[in-house]
Image: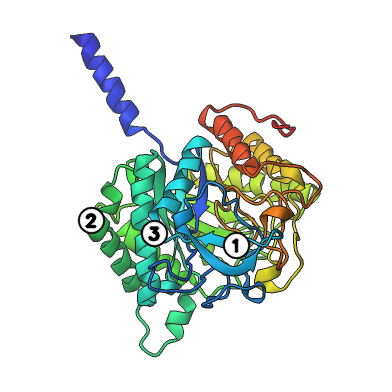
Amino acid sequence: MIKKIYLLAFLFTQYLCAQDLLNHVHTGYQGWFTAKGDNSGLDKWVHWGRGKKELSSEHLTVDMFPDLREYNKKNLYSTSLTYSNGDTVKLFSSNDYETIDLHFKWMQEYSIDGVFLQRFLGPLKNYELKKHRDQVLKHVIKAATKYKRKVAIMYDLSGYENIERKQNKEDFKKFIQKDWESLNKKYDLTEQSCYMHEKQKPVLAIWGLGFNERPFTVRYAKDVLDLFKENPKNSSFDTYLIAGVPSYWRTLSKDSEKNPIWNKLYKSFDMLSPWSVGRYHDIKSYKNYINNVTKEDLKITSSNNIDYMPVVFPGFSWGNLKNESYNSIPRKGGTFLWEQIYQTKKAGAKCIYFAMFDEVDEGTAIFKVAENKKQVPKEGNFVTLDTDGYDLPSDWYLQLANEASNLFNNNLPAPQKLPLK
């Protein structure tokens, strides 16, 4: 009898200490693609192109192209683009459940534990865009439950400044409170079995605080902390709160606002996740970053009992989106990404965040993408997996994510060299 009591107590303790966030690998998920004829209500090519009714080479905004071989053909929509063999190029829409189901199937197959669904505040003022984002969330909940993945909302403040400029602006605090209440009422969000929890609290991330090129001042941070940390209205507001912050938050330099009050505000969050995409461009500059930024960040967050989630990314390109250079941060066959995984694990990070799962717009996608020029439209310019001279399968970066998951889930030392050939 005593042994049973001890066993039950042990199991209960394990339940209380269960972690969905730490000791796992996570990825950001945009799920923001629409197509003409996809019943989203938008009836245009959002995020594949510049929101036009037709998708042609001059309207493209993506630098990488998805590997479409596993998608259901009935969920692919015709564009004005063609392949070298003359076939019409068709693309998916995030408005279809079958597409999101496939993505989460891959996440399970390649051991990606957690997914942060990006919820941009800016589009939420547009009825059709909000309807689409809500539909995507509904699909994500269903797929995450089916494939036993954990999911959390990441509010991205990008675009909210456009709302504030309007004559009938809505108070930021009321705006974000209203949306969070709506999600929990409509979807019972934080009570879903797939919703991510840490330290017995639902996880919520807020991205965009403290950047010097963004208008989100200390007032926004105070509003967020008041809503979700200091005076929560109910259990869904009593969250484990993550702040997506500038790389140089600790020193209040470079990409960070300089106001010293940020030092206090940052320490009020449960976890900090500095945005590192574009802050280094090759392995040499990354080594400088890991030594002078990440390692020092880990020291200060640990001493202040704050968790820390580094961001890693495979490469970068936004030639079509910004009319800038293509492949500006080369992937180098995965060696660039693996160096980040290896170094962050060696430095003592307890989890990582892959930016991003499906971000073909900026060339950071880790899901299955085109291997070579035969798999992309003949019109336009694209970065394919062989661009740097490597012959790689379309799932190469998912394979690397799987290797990283094994390290963080099992607390194993990371090999310095790329573990795949």
Residue for badge 3? 136
Q: Which of the 4 image quadrants contains residue 17?
A: top left
Q: Look at discs 1 and 3 and give the one toward the viewer.
A: 1
Give the answer, above or below, for where 214 lies relative to 237.
Answer: below
Q: Is residue 284 left or right of residue 377?
A: right
Q: Pointers 2 and 3 in contact (CB under 8 A)?
A: no
Residue for badge 2? 234
Q: Is residue 294 left or right of residue 139?
A: right
Residue nearer the viewer, 328 or 393: 393
Residue for badge 1? 89
Quadrant of the drawing holding the C terminus: top right
Q: Is residue 113 visible?
A: no
Measure the C-alpha gap from mark 1 to mark 3.
23 Å
Residue nearer the viewer, 187 or 75: 75
Q: Earlier in the sequence, mark 2 or mark 1?
A: 1
Judging from the image, what secondary structure is the residue with disc 1 in? Answer: strand
Q: Is residue 1 left or right of residue 68?
A: left
Residue nearer the viewer, 337 or 255: 337
Give the answer, above or below, for where 392 lies relative to 362.
Answer: above
* Residue at x-position 28% and y-position 46%: 192
Point out the residue furthest to the bottom here: 167
* Residue at x-position 77% and y-position 52%: 387
Q: Look at discs 2 and 1 and give the one toward the viewer.
A: 1
Q: Pointers 1 and 3 in contact (CB under 8 A)?
A: no
Q: Earlier in the sequence, mark 1 or mark 3?
A: 1
Percent x, y of residue 306: 49, 46
Judging from the image, what secondary structure is the residue with disc 3 in? Answer: helix
Q: Amino acid at mark 3?
A: Val
Give the answer, above or below, for where 271 lies relative to 412.
Answer: below
Measure the C-alpha gap from mark 2 to mark 1.
49 Å
